[in-house]
Amino acid sequence: MPQISVGDLMRAHLSQGSESGIRAAEIINSGSLFPDEIITAIVRDCLHREALAGFLLVGYPLSTAQALALDELLRELGKPLDGVLHLRLPEAEVERHVRRLAARGFCRDERTHRFEPEVDQLLVDGVCNVCGGELYQRGDDTESSIRSKFRSRDAWLEPVTRHYARQDLLVTVDAAGTSDEIAKRALTALRAHNPRPRSGPATS
Ligand SMILES: [Zn+2]
């Protein structure tokens, strides 16, 4: 099934300088969050252009306004949702990510060089593998600030998951293990939730 990553769509619009992209760039430069209507216009444009029989929307909708707009858009297209996949991080996984992110090292010479002790093997402690620059930890990378970011994300997603739970579309899956394990678990859960042949779109 084709996947439509709304994050990728946004980046493509930004780099092409489309009308939505230009407005989005102005918003990014002003330091504000993206308004729902721009994101929805980009998704609308893509779904009308692609005319896919079925698809998986990734990273959208992330607010109740976006969810309501998507309901409306899919009604127009005559393609009801089959299911909404909610990947939930179990508490132990949250703590693992918190420790991993808090231990990240950033290169003083090039900010795109970053290292995670659990994933990357440093050749020399405290030194960037790529350019030899000094590694440092960011001041806001404390365990408690990272943990509170995870918590606030759960909190602002809650109205969206409630919106779909009310329509009996929500399928919640634990996002623990490798990406293959998570994908397998998600597919099994979606099939169990909706055993008829997959024709319409799903979203996550
Ligand atoms: Zn470096």
Image (cartoon, rainbow, N blue to C red):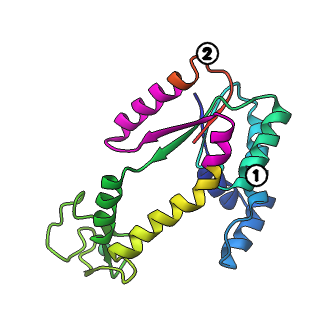
| Residue 102 in magenta stretch | no
> How much space separates mark 1 and mark 2, taking CA atoms?
27 Å
- In front of the other: 163 or 123: 163
Quadrant, the N terminus: top right
Q: Residue at x 53, y 43 (%)?
A: 86
Residue at the spot of label 1? 40
| Residue 162 in magenta stretch | yes
- In front of the other: 49 or 35: 35
Task: Write down which quadrant ligand 1 falls in.
Answer: bottom left
Q: Residue at x 68, y 75 (%)?
A: 32
51 sits to left or right of 196: right
Q: Nearer the viewer, mark 1 or mark 2?
A: 2
**Where is residue 61 drawn, in percent x and y?**
66, 49
Please state the extent of the stretch shown in magenta in the rendering.
Answer: 161-190
Q: Which mark is residue 141?
A: none
Residue at the spot of label 2? 197
Q: Residue at x 29, y 58 (%)?
A: 96
Residue 77 is drawn in which quadrant? top right
For mark 1, give the secondary structure: helix
Identify whether 104 is placed above or below 75.
below
